[in-house]
Amino acid sequence: MKVYGGARLRTDSDPVESLSGRPGLESAELNLGGLSVAICGAGLIISAAVDLTGAGQDAPALGAVGVSALLLGLVIRSRVRLPERVSPRSSLRTVGVSLMAMIIVSVIAYRATGAIVAPGEALMESTSGFTTTALTVLEDPQRLGSGVLFWRAMTQWIGGFAALATVIAILPFLGVSGPTSSKVRVPVRRTQMSAPRMNRLLGRYFALYLLLTIIGGVLYLVGGMGPFDATTYAFTTVSTGGFANHSGSFTFFDSSLLDWMGVAGMFLGGLSLAVVWSVLRGRTRAVLGSAELFVYCGLIAGATAVLALVESPGTDFASNVRISAFTATSAVSSTGHWVANWAGWAPGPQMMLLILIGVGAMSGSVGGGFRIVRAMTLFSYLARELDVQLRPRRVRVIRVGNEVIDERLMRRILGYQVLYLGTAATGFFLLALTGTDLPTALSGSISALSTNGFALGELGVGQPLSNLGRDALVVLLLLMIAGRLELYPLLDGVRAVIGWPIHRIRNRMAARGSARRSRH
């Protein structure tokens, strides 16, 4: 509590009165962090129940960790209140705290079951899971029990919705999410969002996310998968994660029908949920007029045609189209599932796929990458600047589809582009310093930051991370977290860590200077 002229002003660190009238703590970071731990606990309990349908050897460990996490999360939620209004900066920290809490719970679960004993490998697998990246430390996931495999898939499913919540709760306020047609937009841009409104939006999007997951599971059942594989692959497809229960991903099933079902599932994962919401509300005309949706479909179709004609990865026309469509959809949606080792293809198709991975999926989707709508905005900006250079007196606005882009939003997107490219370049430099070859460093930085995973060289399709050294794994881990958090929460955390000692030093120097002046 601070006093100014006799008036008492409450600071963020002061206790507040709870609903029962007793002093209580109010913190979005702790409250939602506790909720994240509780959700993981519930997921582990479900995984333990699934494990009982098989050998059941991991059920006791999964259940014990799950119950502990659930109780801990509920206790934190009961002791710490969610503020009535959550500021953007508090939201940034909440996202970071929640992600790290979930990763820690998963690390404990992997080690408790003995599925992954080494702490570093358990940390890497957990981070890949919650950041929905296909990179894995496991050479043969089939050796794991059904409960651990179910939890492994669930980490990506939970992480996918957590990423979606980040897009809803933070990016509209920061003004870097990019434009969306007003007829298919659900979030609104405000400086603060009330907790009840945020809960309503998240509830609406969770229902859509669950609906897409059910659709994905049904598609896989129709394609011939068993109930367990259909559920787990639906988790890792709709979340654009890419974890597979088998070392060969979709090649394990050797089914053309399942490959096409995978294409449909990955397409849904990279689709904006605002578009899905508009379709369910009958606004199909507005959706069909969405420029971003048109570009999303065009990128997949165009890349499919190029791969089928240039690379010809199959044995006949039908297999060429199928493998090309699967690979292109996996790249654009940043999923990471695969049916062919594109790391061994010609340089041209490889570079095209890396560019598609870097651009990423639609804004408002679970997918990663720079996002299509931001790229469209930048192209419109470049076209405007070129036109201004040729005809200086002409006034031209920046437009994406039918939407006119505000200059302030344009500046923020330009700033995000600089931040995104700077992060990718830094990752490339650091990976090269660890001793990886240049193709691995460059492609790995782009793919990890876009939360796709597989790349070229030592990060080739289907290769486990055991081929890389510890330093390279640390760099990849940070890139995955940065990409999944949309950069800003991680940047805020780095600034806080660096700024805290600097702030302390400045305060001490100011105090010493004040003491000297008072003595003189």
Image (cartoon, helix red, strand yellow):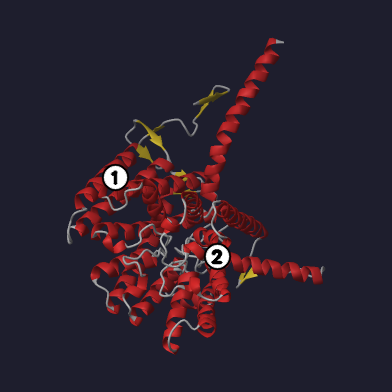
Q: Residue at x 51, y 54 (%)?
A: 479
Residue marked by disc 1: 69
Crowding near the residue tagged with mark 1, few <14, some 14–19, many ≥20 C-alpha atoms within 10 Å = many
- Nearer the observer: mark 1 or 2; the answer is 2
Q: Classify mark 2: helix, strand or loop.
A: helix
Query: Could you say where residue 404 lies in the image, as x and y percent from the top left?
Result: 64, 67
Disc 1, disc 2: CB below 8 Å? no
The answer to whether residue 383 shows anywhere in this view is yes
39 is higher (above) or lower (below) than 442: above
Q: Residue at x 19, y 54 (%)?
A: 57
Q: Nearer the viewer, residue 1 or 45?
A: 45
Q: Classify mark 1: helix, strand or loop.
A: helix
410 is higher (above) or lower (below) than 319: above
Crowding near the residue tagged with mark 2, few <14, some 14–19, many ≥20 C-alpha atoms within 10 Å = many
Q: Residue at x 64, y 65 (%)?
A: 378
| Residue 289: assigned label | none
Gap in angstroms between the C-alphas marked 1 and 2: 36 Å
| Amino acid type of the residue tagged 2 in the rendering | Gly
Query: On the picture, is 437 further left or further right than 411?
Result: left
| Amino acid type of the residue tagged 1 in the rendering | Ala
Residue marked by disc 2: 358
Query: Could you say where residue 281 lies in the image, as x and y percent from the top left?
Result: 41, 71
Q: Nearer the viewer, residue 313 or 506?
A: 313
The answer to whether residue 200 shows anywhere in this view is no
